[in-house]
Amino acid sequence: MLYTKMNDIIDEVNAEVAEREELVECIAICLLARKNMFILGETGQAKSYAINEFRKRITGAKQFEYLMSKQTDEEQIFGRLDLSSIIPDNLPKEELMKDEVYSEYVNTIRAMYEEYKAERDEKVLKEAADKAAKLSYIKRIVCSTSDNAPRIITKGKIPDSHIVFLDEIFKSADGILNSLLTALNERVYTNEGQTVPIPVISIFSASNEIPDFKDPAQAILKPLYDRFELKVLTEYVQEPENRMRVLKNKQSGANGKINATISLHELEKMQKQMEKVIVPDSINELMDNVLCELRRNGVRVSDRKYFGFTPIVKAKAYLSGNTEVAPKDLMVLKNYFWDTPNERETVEKILSDICENPIGTEVDKLLDMANESKSLMEETLGLMTDEGVSDDEKIKAYVVFSRELLKIYIALTALRETDLSDSDLETVVNSENELEAMLSEAAKKVGMTYIPLSEQKIMSI
């Protein structure tokens, strides 16, 4: 499978950097899912290095890199106006060569001139000159019958590239923001009234800061920031052994060797294979729980962002060699849902709680409900020592508790209907026993006959 070649690149780039596994994997996911990525971290943390080493290994892909500043203008990154395209009755050379007759004459004249240079035959030169005269007439006809709309020379710029790295993108001048937005979001470029699709797969950027969007002068950059679907935080290398490994590699000259590569064509095939990865209904239900929990904890997630998570988790599953998304694949979204760095820890915890152990999380939720009902009953039973409280009220409190516990027990046993691992099944069984013990203890307290919840469930059907 082709995905193994992408994993070979991930391993090779990880061998050149340290503690950048998350970043390197997200680069691969962006390329597979055609998403953009922003890396936030202090200077000197190998952010740009990791991106550049990865994209070096995508052969046949046109690359564009630029360090943005307030002085950067649109021509520097999107291309300049071809002045020849605005001269009346004129066309740029590449447009003229698209005409079959014109290109045939040009090639013939070129061949005749090469023959003349070799043999110095004046007759050949005269024939070439005659054809050149006819070529000028042909050119005039082609120009007069063609659309003379202004054209932009985009060769070597963003509209001519597959992978783009715009370092410090938030330092861009205001005048090019709209063009950057459409390139990031819609993969199109508009100039001189013409909108054309561009082949960009992913746009990457890195910086040691993000704008202060509360500042009116910087608020204009917020839409640009939002167009980077994945956002990764980096830190300085923490572990001494990792620092030593990178240091020794640099000293020995071991870095910079490229062995693992994939072609642009192979990447496009991977993208099509990735699209076939299935997202089960259970994953969508899990993600709805994640959304509700994120919003409950103050993490703002727009509907647009929520509905756009699918390609990212598909790419993660694809890299693992899976044909459908599993709960563990959702952990990659810790680099998707946060907006400000202080939200990332909350996002990661919520994803971990819900996705890494979905059965355990659901069981804990049901047990919390059971313990809450138990506390309410015990509070009521505590009042039974007061004068004037009847045995009927005591029994009533037990009956209410018993009914609530039965509902929880039924919900708990329903988890058995899913495809459980041995450890998950053990968790469910232990929790069922815990509920039975709660009810048995409560029955003793009020002097009632204990009827197991398993039997009550059968009778309730």
Image (cartoon, rainbow, N blue to C red):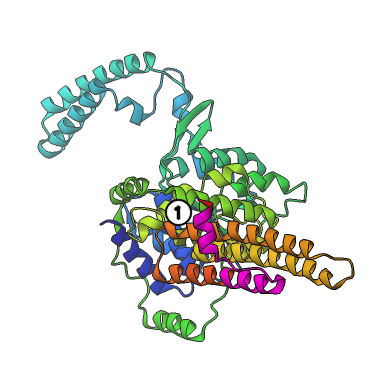
Q: Which three-letter amino acid code belongs to the residue tagged 1?
A: Val
**Residue 202, percent across and down?**
46, 49
Where 254 sits versus 154, above or below? below
> Is residue 454 found inside the magenta-colored segment of the image?
yes
Please state if 81 lies on the left or on the right of 344 as rendered: left
Give whichever of 250, 354 is nearer the camera: 354
Question: Which quarter of the rendering shows the N terminus?
Answer: bottom left
- What percent of the width, then of the height, locates residue 256? 36, 70
At a point 47% along the width and 81% down the height, the residue shown is 242
Q: Position of residue 72 (x, y in %)?
A: 59, 47
Looking at the image, which residue is at 36% across and 59% down? 319
Residue 43 falls in image quadrant: bottom right
What is the magenta range?
436-459
Q: Is the magenta stretch mostly helix, strand or loop?
A: helix
Q: In this view, does 374 lie to the left or right of 4?
A: right
Asked if residue 244 is among those painted magenta in the image, a careful observer would answer no
Quick one: SS at disc 1?
helix
Q: Which residue position holds label 1? A: 313
Along the horizontal axis of the image, is 58 left or right of 285?
left
- In the picture, measured across the screen, residue 426 lies left or right of residue 290, that is left
Q: Can residue 334 be seen in this view?
A: yes
* Placement of 121 over or under 180, stated as above or below: above
What is the quadrant of residue 254 in the picture? Answer: bottom left
Between residues 28 and 50, which one lies in front from this camera angle?
28
Task: In the rendered view, tell whether residue 112 sits above or below residue 408.
Answer: above
